[in-house]
């Protein structure tokens, strides 16, 4: 029974680029959340905050992996 070695779904050479793109998009979404008006619908605020959290989370993971800290 031969099994194939486990490989990453994303080539390691792309980790710094993905970190940069994800963190940039997350910071942009965070900025959009901060400048939203108080009378903006709650669903829109939650959507913006979830997008920001998702991008910042992936950006943090890719940043950690690209500098050699494997999580």
Image (tube, rainbow, N blue to C red):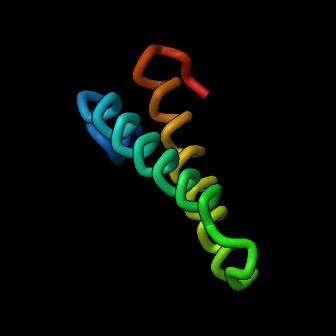
Q: Locate the C terminus by quadrant.
A: top right
- The residue under the point 50% across, 49% down is 26
Q: How many marks?
A: 0
> Where in the figure is residue 10, as x and y percent of width and height?
32, 43
> Where in the figure is residue 4, as x and y percent of width and height?
34, 42
| 43 and 7: which is toward the camera | 43
> Where in the figure is residue 69, as x and y percent of width and height?
55, 17
Using the rendered view, name the quadrant where residue 3 is placed.
top left
Residue 16 lies left or right of residue 30; in this view the side is left
Using the rendered view, name the quadrant where residue 36 is placed.
bottom right
Residue 69 against residue 8 in the figure, above or below: above
Residue 67 against residue 40 in the figure, above or below: above
| 24 and 62: which is toward the camera | 24
- The residue under the point 55% across, 34% down is 60
- The residue under the point 70% across, 85% down is 41
Q: Is residue 5 visible?
A: no
Residue 38 against residue 66 in the figure, above or below: below
- The residue under the point 56% across, 45% down is 56
Q: Is residue 50 visible?
A: yes
Residue 39 against residue 50 in the figure, above or below: below
> Where in the figure is residue 18, as x and y percent of width and height?
34, 40
């Amino acid at each position: 029974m031969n099994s194939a070695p486990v490989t990453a779904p994303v080539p390691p050479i792309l980790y710094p680029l993905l970190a940069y793109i994800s963190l940039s998009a997350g910071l942009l979404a965070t900025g959009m959340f901060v400048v939203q008006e108080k009378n903006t619908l709650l669903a829109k605020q939650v959507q913006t905050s979830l997008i920001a959290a998702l991008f910042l989370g992936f950006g943090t993971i890719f940043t950690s992996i690209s500098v050699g800290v494997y999580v």
